[in-house]
Amino acid sequence: MNKFSTLFIALLFSNIISAQDTTQTESKVPFDGYDLTWVNGQNRQRYFPVELKNKQGETILSAMALGDVYYNFNFARPIDNTQTNSASIGRSKEVTLNLFTIGMETNYKNIIGRLSLQIGNIISVIQDLDQSVTRGRNTTVEDLRFIREAAVGYHLNKLYGINIEGGIFMSYIGLESYLLQENWCYQRSMVCEFTPFYFTGARVQIYPSKKVKTEIWLVNGWQSYNSWNKYMGLGNSTYWRPNENLQLAANFYAGEETKVNGMVRFHHDNSICYRYYKEHRRYGLTQAAFSINNHFGFQAGTGISGFSQYMVGTSVANRLWFAANKFAVTARFDIVANPGTYLAFTPSPVTPNAFTDAIAADPHHMLLMEQAVVCFDIMPLDYFTLRFEYGFRHANVPYFAGHGGTTSPDGFTTTPIGTWKPDLIKNEHRFSISANFRI
């Protein structure tokens, strides 16, 4: 660990010890009494039925299970049934088990323990992208790919709570969640798709008041199990909720993310979620809210400036709930620019292709993409959602799968490719139906 990281940790723990000496010892609950089930990217459950309590009524262990299945129809009808350039949806014209996860958590006597296991198609489009495991030996993606989250730590009853944890965590960058059930739309916004979904490392969560949470992260890298170089990544996340109708967040990250020493990546996102209408009624409009999520980042070093490789984008969504929140409609628009394409998905492993040819021909290496999504949710219970969604995407270069697919001439990975090239187009239309449960 470098001198900066050592000094940072020493200062952090000195502040925690100071807080222990100057604050009262009683436990306080941050955001107590807040209804946050409406927030984009948050669990909408109000009740958690699987809990184990002791004789004093304290919860010593809680468990969860989530299942997510979808059918996605891409109007280009790619012959290999591959949905490209998405970390939310990986297949087309098939019923797909996207994710099944079970987990448990304990906070008994201030000990923090958390483990969530996962299987499903979503693993192939997220975990398989991690190439940090090629550094050294005794490590592979297979070691950890079925672990969604695993952490150990300790809770301090100071301020409104301080948590110190280490392990594998869901990413704090971006507004929308890895768990699609928690988002207002099934297909995530592209600004969130371009950012990490997990981190390996350590974090300190500090709740200085009922309305504020701030986190400091020391991680191996940007969505990576291992570190790329000699320095680890450093991040910060802060949430301010002055009341249950407003959430403001700002996140930062900096780290080395390539094999090349000195190549530094910086990323920042900020968001606002505001519920501007709420009415307790059985019929008609019951809630209305909007969210805005802005991103900016760059990668620079070894002769590459941040002006040639950067990412900037925004996502704006509005959601309406009806009939005691049993139904909801969401409309969302997002746009992202990624010159240098350092965060972009690779539409096909077969190169060259229309995307790589177009990017090489553009002196600015620009990828500009827009997405519009309309989603309708049926939610008879807090534990079940049936979702219908239409999505349109456009890119300034051929980027999405056409009818010829992106795998081989007949769509199978075992077929020789020869001189064949993937069929890529600029516009994509799709429709999906998804169902999920969570208890």
Image (cartoon, rainbow, N blue to C red):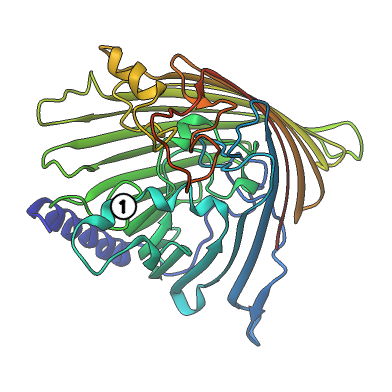
Q: Which residue is mark 1?
A: 217
Q: Nearer the viewer, residue 366 or 281?
A: 366
Q: Residue at x 41, y 52 (%)?
A: 128
Q: Residue furthest right?
A: 283
Q: Nearer the viewer, residue 382 or 333?
A: 333
Q: Is residue 359 visible?
A: yes
Q: Nearer the viewer, residue 86 or 38?
A: 86
Q: Nearer the viewer, residue 18 or 371?
A: 371
Indicate the quadrant containing the C terminus: top left, top right, bottom left or bottom right: bottom right
Using residue 267 as the reference point, say whether residue 264 is left or right of it.
left
Q: Amino acid at mark 1?
A: Trp
Q: Residue at x 28, y 24 (%)?
A: 340
Using residue 261 as the reference point, say whether residue 148 is left or right of it.
right
Q: Residue at x 57, y 37 (%)?
A: 83
Q: Residue at x 56, y 62 (%)?
A: 119
The image shows residue 184 at horizontal and vertical percentages of: 65, 37
| Mark 1 surroundings within 10 Å by alpha-carbon count, few (fewer than 14), some (14 through 19), many (20 or more) | many
